[in-house]
Image (tube, rainbow, N blue to C red):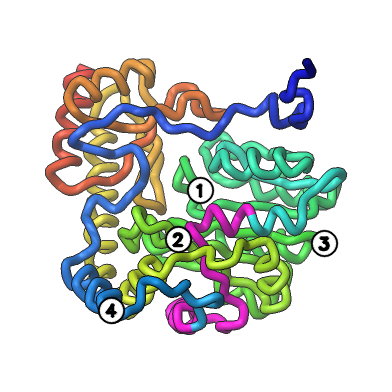
Amino acid sequence: MSNPLEKIKSAVRGLRAYTLSPERASVKLNQNESPWDASEAIKRETLRRMGGRAWNRYPDFVPAALHEKLAAFAGWKSEGVLAGNGSNELIQALLMVTVGEGRRVLISEPTFALYRQVATVLGGEVLSVPLDAGLQFDVAALLDSIRTNDPDVTIICSPNNPTGCRMSDGALETLLAAARGLVVVDEAYFEFSGETVVPLLERHPNLAVFRTFSKAMALAALRVGYLLAAPELAREVGKALLPYNLNAFSQTAAEVSVEMYDGELAPVVRHIVAERERLFEELRRVPGLAPVASRANFMVVRSTVEPKRVFDELLRRDILIRDVSGYPMLADYFRVSVGTPRENDLLIAGLKEILG
């Protein structure tokens, strides 16, 4: 009998699957979620609208109402918006319509592992440029790789997961001007930086921007993301999406969240940013720790104690963080999401005990 695994691409068999440790804790600081749930006002209005909807009917084939609201929220054209089942689905769709054998994808590492995984599964060649010694984007090295290797897609996560650095608009425009391929900016955490590259879309038709409702919008459970791009590019990416990819409940909750963003969500974002800065300053004072300044709702922290031991010791204290020591350049680092003030205080106290 033949081995069915022989039919799996060798590059795929060599990949390590994207996974998350199964541990659970009361203080959950490992997935960059909002530490506060969606507000009662958002939940009530979503349930009210869903109560008046026929559940036996499919959702809108094209969620036009949501696209219009996202366009107004982002400051872009509705025909250049695509909503998806999380931004991950849209990242996969864009790579599906661009990447195959002989195609190249350029990334800057360490970064979100899914980019490499999806590109490799699709048969593409992944080129990597490391961040600089300060864990910031090495724009000169990226520019050199674009000019030398002519990648079909360049992916920039900004603010970057897991390091929290953001690429300046000027640096991005330099890359856009040099690239013959697409340049993709993953803005999953843009709300926490207070900056966006969306205004560059008008001048650069090779730019695509991804966003998510899983972080600042506090809808991680409902899996909503969106793409912003030139209308003709959005049309082509849409061909890789399955019909009815976004369920009616998620569509409705996303519409309500956009409508109520200023009153219900923006104050929470400001609170998280303030807590991020407080947490950074507190961790700087702990001997043996060196946090890296972040523009997101998380930060990586260099530790003189092995990150795996820090992870285990915090877990014993019912605190869950992310051990990122397996990432390139991060052998001495762990990552913490910004929690509530109480959760951050428990984290700080636990780290002082461990490092002390």
From the top left corner, tell me how far across and down residue 128 is, in percent. Answer: 70, 38
Sort mark 3 into few (<14), some (14-19) or many (20+) by Cα contacts within 10 Å.
some
Q: Quadrant of residue 222?
A: bottom left
Observer-side mark, 2 or 4, equals: 4
Where disc 4 sits, the SS reads helix
Sort mark 2 into few (<14), some (14-19) or many (20+) by Cα contacts within 10 Å.
many
Q: Earlier in the sequence, mark 1 or mark 2?
A: 1
Position of the N terminus, as image quadrant, is: top right
The residue labelled by disc 2 is 212
Q: Is residue 42 left or right of residue 105?
A: left
Observer-side mark, 3 or 2, equals: 2
Residue ID at (55%, 62%): 210
Position of the C terminus, as image quadrant, is: top left
Observer-side mark, 1 or 4, equals: 4
From the top left corner, tell me how far across and down residue 99 is, in percent. Answer: 77, 51
Whole-angstrom CA distance, mark 3 to mark 2, is: 27 Å
Sort mark 4 into few (<14), some (14-19) or many (20+) by Cα contacts within 10 Å.
few
Whole-angstrom CA distance, mark 1 to mark 4, is: 36 Å
The residue labelled by disc 1 is 160
Q: Quadrant of residue 28?
A: top left
Give the magenta range: 65-92
Whole-angstrom CA distance, mark 3 to mark 1, is: 23 Å
